[in-house]
Image (cartoon, helix red, strand yellow):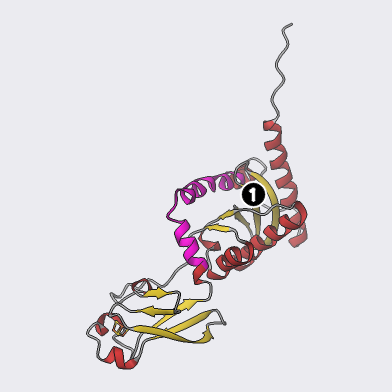
């Protein structure tokens, strides 16, 4: 539902209604991922405050698929994330990845491929966003799977984001037909940015600074919406001479 286009070091962020391809909010930010993700939050909250609109789903690319963003969408706003999950847990050295460990939600622990338990002390690491689930050294020392699990460590550790449940929601959605439809509909955003560049010629900014950029982006979005609305008005039927 939103996407960005970069010009110099500033980015134009749109929040659009996917059904009608109408732009509902605009935000100029620096062209860095963190600022663009922050813009998505700002636009969603502002649209809800000003227009009383809250999306049921947000379709966006993987730049918006961080654990924190997914947690914000799912847990704080009940918005379905139609977004690829940003996930680096897969291993390519032949050892078990996190998905080889089964999470037991009821008891808050992981079960390893050998059937042993990995538990957490509840201490948060990595900026307070991750829990570490550890196997017992006693179990790992005696385990014949150790060379495929933790060959260079005394015991296996499995990290779990505090937003993992929201990530699971996004993973489940990614297997649905609705997700495929959302991905197709995101092309409407690309078309808006292509139009911005080719037809409105907004490939460089005339006004300076972030406020100038915000004004230019806002005017361009207004022009695009007006053009869209004009197309929706039926042409008058020509009267015979
Ligand atoms: S090495 Fe430890 S964590 Fe890995 S499979 Fe064996 S017992 Fe489980």
Residue at x 55%, y 62% (from the top left corner): 64
The answer to whether residue 60 shows anywhere in this view is yes
The answer to whether residue 9 shows anywhere in this view is no
Residue at x 70%, y 60% (from the top left corner): 45
In front of the other: 160 or 28 = 160
Q: In this view, does 29 lie above or below 222?
A: below
In front of the other: 198 or 147 = 147
| 154 to the left or right of 195 | left
Residue at x 33%, y 89% (from the top left corner): 153
State the residue lying farthest toward the left: 144
| 30 to the left or right of 158 | right
| 145 to the left or right of 40 | left
Q: In the rendered image, which residue does mark 1 sit on?
A: 16
Where residue 37 appears, as percent x and y from the top left, is 61, 64
What is the span of residues highlighted in magenta in the rendered image?
166-192
State the residue lying farthest toward the front: 106
């Amino acid at each position: 539902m939103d996407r960005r286009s970069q010009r110099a070091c500033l980015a134009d962020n749109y929040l659009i209604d996917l059904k009608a391809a109408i732009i509902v909010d605009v935000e100029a930010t620096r062209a860095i991922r963190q600022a663009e993700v922050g813009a998505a939050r700002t636009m969603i909250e502002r649209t809800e405050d000003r227009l009383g609109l809250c999306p049921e789903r947000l379709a966006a690319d993987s730049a918006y698929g961080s654990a924190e963003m997914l947690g914000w969408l799912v847990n704080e706003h009940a918005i379905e994330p139609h977004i690829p999950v940003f996930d680096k847990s897969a291993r390519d050295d032949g050892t078990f990845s996190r998905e080889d460990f089964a999470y037991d939600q009821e008891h808050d622990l992981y079960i390893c491929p050998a059937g042993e338990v990995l538990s957490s002390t509840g201490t948060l690491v990595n900026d307070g966003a991750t829990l570490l689930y550890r196997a017992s050294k006693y179990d790992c020392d005696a385990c014949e799977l150790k060379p495929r699990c933790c060959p260079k460590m005394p015991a296996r550790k499995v990290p779990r984001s505090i937003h993992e449940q929201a990530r699971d929601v996004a993973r489940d959605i990614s297997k649905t037909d609705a997700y495929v439809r959302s991905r197709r509909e995101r092309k409407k955003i690309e078309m808006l940015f292509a139009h911005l560049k080719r037809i409105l010629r907004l490939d460089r900014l005339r006004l300076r600074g972030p406020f100038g950029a915000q004004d230019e982006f806002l005017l361009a979005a207004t022009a695009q919406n007006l053009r869209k609305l004009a197309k929706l008005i039926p042409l008058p039927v020509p009267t015979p001479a």
